[in-house]
Image (tube, rainbow, N blue to C red):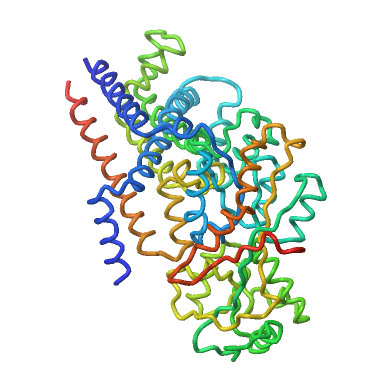
Amino acid sequence: MLRRSFVLGCAAAAAVIGLVQGAVPSASLAADRFITVASTTSTEDSGLFGSILPKFTAKTGIEVRVVAKGTGQAIDLAKRGDADVLFVHHKPSEEKFVAEGFSTVRKPVMYNDFVIVGPAVDPAGIKGSKDVAASLGKIAGAKAPFVSRGDDSGTHKAELALWKTASLDPAKADGGWYKSIGQGMGPTLNTAAAMNGYTLTDRGTWLNFKNRGPLTILVEGDKRLFNQYGVMLVNPAKFSHVKATDGQAFVDWLVSAEGQQAIADYKINGEQLFFPNANEPGA
Amino acid sequence: MQDFSQALAVALSMIASLDQGLMRIVGLSLQVSLTAVAAATLIGLPLGAAVAALHFPGRRALAVALNTMMGMPPVVVGLVVYLLLSRSGPFGVLGLLFTPSAMIAAQTVLIVPIIASLARQTVEDLLVEYDDLLRVTGTGPVRRLVTLLSEARWSLFTTVLAGFGRASAEVGAVMIVGGNIEHVTRVMTTAIALETSKGDLPMALGLGLVLLSLSLAINLLASMLKETTARP
């Protein structure tokens, strides 16, 4: 008797699982035609993909599955063949990716810019400066807390390059006023907000970010804060499973007049986040 | 305090409106974690009972290994499963990376040690009572395990729930092998991580409350099931 009721219980549990399985439209059934795009947190967290991808899918019937990581991790993922398209923002790494044969061509897509945000009280006194190197120097001079991504992302690499232009090595102060936290843009902003610190962020993530606390934009407009995005189809000669046709369709759409317009149309509170520049030579 | 009341309001309005995006995420969370628990139960219970009740070489070592693996960080499990399922890994040809199946596999690996370890302890305790009887009746090893598991079933119920708790709460493994792809592999915990990185803390906490209520519902259902079926 006992055993029978136990069996009954197990059957009931199995039935519940079965029900759940049936109720959830299986992902593999929902979309038989899709591509996987390795991209960066800045494009996802800023809301850009949420705005432009439906337009692409409506036109082509190809679903775009975005795996959003830091640029370094996204590139590594693509190098393992786990994505069809790579869409990131660190030109030297992208050119290396192509040079190593993981893609045949890189295409520029758009740019936005980085800004230095920090507490409105601004202990380093950099507000309104257009000279990013001088501003970083002042932050270091004041030993004001600076939160670094520290995660090998495009933004992290850009930050390190900017310290170099200021002839400073913040690694020496690691653990002191310079805090390398090894996390994405959002968590880095959360941390900076919580410790009244400065940080470098892309403008898109900043505009879409809600937990700003005391933070405000202090330095912007320096040409060195320019942030270029590029897109590449992962080389199908390297990985035979890469969805070359559909992936190429996405790359072509991004740099087409239609895709470029979709990027330009994405605004938060009337402010444009990304500036298409696929046709700009050398971008 | 305002954050908490805001989060509660977000949670209630999401539940009340049966927000479609949320329902999808909740459904996938349940699908992944319940399937993982079912698989881990099928593997973990017999494994735990065997380590407790059968004599074979390496049995003690296996028990220690299972106990140790209970403390395995989800992110490490995620990384291992990722490397196995990656296109450059040994199982890459299956194309399972960034699918719910990959998430189920990772969570199963994560909770098999928990279920097996706790089951081993339960069965070991039970064996003190039953050992003589089983010896006298001279039952074979399979029969022996079935009898012990069956006798321990209500304690093992809690074991399975512990496994479910661990599976539904972890974020490290599913984030890596699932990729947190919207509509495809986004579950409750990865959605919470995403909202946190967008700085939308009330939304993140609201989702946390929804997850907690979901866990409450499952546990209530389980205890009701136990109540009704336990009556002879």
Question: Residue B210, how many percent across, how many down?
Answer: 31, 51
Which of A231 and A118 lies nearest the eye of the viewer? A231
**Quadrant of residue A218 within the rendered picture:** bottom right
Q: Is B230 above or below relative to B76?
A: above
Q: Residue furthest front?
A: A257
Image quadrant holding the C terminus of chain A, namely bottom right
Image quadrant holding the N terminus of chain A, namely top left
> Does residue A240 appear to the left or right of A196 in the view shown?
right
Question: Residue B143, how many percent across, how many down?
Answer: 41, 12
Which of B27 and B20 lies nearest the eye of the viewer? B20
Number of labels in the image equals 0
Q: Inspect this view and state whether residue A81 appears.
A: yes
> Does residue A161 appear to the left or right of B160 in the view shown?
right
Question: Residue A114, how many percent across, how many down?
Answer: 61, 72
Residue drawn 47% across and 41% down?
Answer: B184
> Does residue A191 appear to the left or right of A17 in the view shown?
right
**Quadrant of residue A110 within the rendered picture:** bottom right
Q: Is B82 above or below relative to A12?
A: below
Question: Residue A212, how many percent across, how many down?
Answer: 45, 74
Residue drawn 21% across and 26% down?
Answer: B230
Residue drawn 27% across and 61% down?
Answer: B8
Residue drawn 38% across and 31% down?
Answer: B122
Q: Inspect this view and state whether residue B74 appears.
A: no
